[in-house]
Image: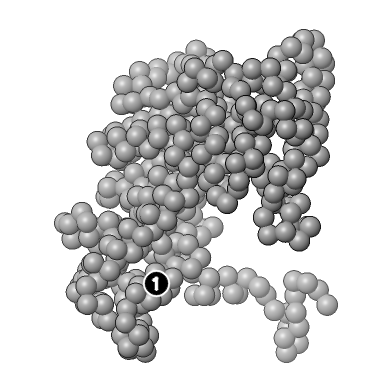
Amino acid sequence: MSNTRYATRGSPLKHERFCSAPEYERGILATFVAKKCSLIGDSKLAALLWFLQQRSLVLSGLGEVADELTAQLPANHQTSLKTSESRLAEQLERLCVDPEFGFADIGGLADPVGALTAYRARCIEKAREQIAFTTIAQRMFELLDFAFNTRSMVLAEGDSRLGKSRAARTWCEMHPGLARYVEIPASNDDRTFYATVAESLGVAKGSSYNGQQINLRVMEVLKNSRLMLVLDEAQFLWPQYNRPHGTPARIQWVKTLFDAGVPMGLVAMPEFSRWQQLLVEKTNWSDAQFRGRLSRYVRLPLLTEQDLTLIARQLMPAGNVTCIKLLVGYAISSKCNASAVAETLKSARYRARNDGHSEADVTDIKKAIQEDQLPTERALLSMAKQRLRRNGRGTSADTPPNLGGVSAAAVFDGSAVDEPHLPEHAAAQ
């Protein structure tokens, strides 16, 4: 029997007929919530509606919100609320879209505004607990706080694997509903770009919309709300090909939204500035108007030893001092970034699970470094050297970061664990 077609009373079953089933529908359209918020006039109540709308977009939806709110009630109230004619999840959905249905109309909750405010605060605290407040996170939070409170446009540039994306995403989670995180796609496809933004907002769902239709709905929501966009991988806002008389369409889109009152947080690799300069040099477009709209620019520093220790503690809260030092020592002597800690710990935990252990120990971490991380690092380094030789260049630039003379190979034998060192440029941060 075919995997895609099944016989039903002599005729094939077409899967497409189920695509529009209500069970697959998820999320409240942001366009409706924007209209409802315009009638409220209270920023705190509007924030609660946007919070509910964003929560409706995830898989568990408002059902999870209703369950957690119900769990805070006395047992007798829980029973009456669950068996009532209108379930709480349905009331929360109606609250977001029905202009005649207010917070006071929610049955079963003595103080709906207080209950939802407390639940939102718990979600914010939960997000806060999931991040290590490194130098990078602190700089990112300060920058995005400024943009949010002053409704400005800001730009943060930094090398890869510093944790800037994690910080941006967490900051948005700590402003639930009011700040939307978007990872800009690398393609030049306009529809993909607009659809990515639309997905974070909860508009223009479905494959029947073309790029322009999606963009119109995105613009409508953002112009009629007080939401903030945080655009990660913002270097891809610049076109990936040059046209002598062309303009950077995505940058112009950002500029148009900002002029309409939408605060923007741009998070990018250093390529952002380089591609901006290249575009100006190769085309007739001037970046003066875009530069004039940037209120703040931050070049993120490298991670310090203290930062890496915070990350290791966050990822391995039950780890002893030796485990933490081993993770940090390898990160310092190798890549000097957050991913070195995360990837090493991932390999160590995989080994521990295979051995029937609940958590990795020093032995697992040493094996992960020696047998997983170092061979991978050497292989990648060899590939880079071969590429440079083919291009007729030397290999000195391929030498991996050296932290005060500590080699990566010295980490797993314990010689670099007690006193890990930082390179001069990192120690100066």
The kind of residue tagged 1 is Glu
- Residue where numbered disc 1 is placed: 68
Q: In front here: 175 or 346?
A: 346
Q: Residue at x 81, y 30 (%)?
A: 379
Find the residue positioned furthest to the left. Answer: 41
- When the figure is inspected, residue 212 is found, relative to residue 328, above or below; the finding is below
Q: Is residue 12 above or below residue 413?
A: below
Q: Nearer the viewer, residue 153 or 18?
A: 153
Instruction: Write down the quadrant of residue 308 in the picture.
Output: top right
Query: How many other residues sit within 10 Å of disc 1, few (<14), some (14-19) or many (≥20)?
Result: few
Q: Which x, y percent locates residue 289?
A: 33, 22
Residue 381 shown left or right of residue 197 in the figure: right
Instruction: Identify the residue shown where x is 45% and y is 61%.
Output: 57
Q: Position of residue 292 (x, y in %)?
A: 31, 21
Label tally: 1
Viewport quadrant of the N terminus:
bottom right
Circle 1 sits in a helix, a strand or a loop, which is it? Answer: helix
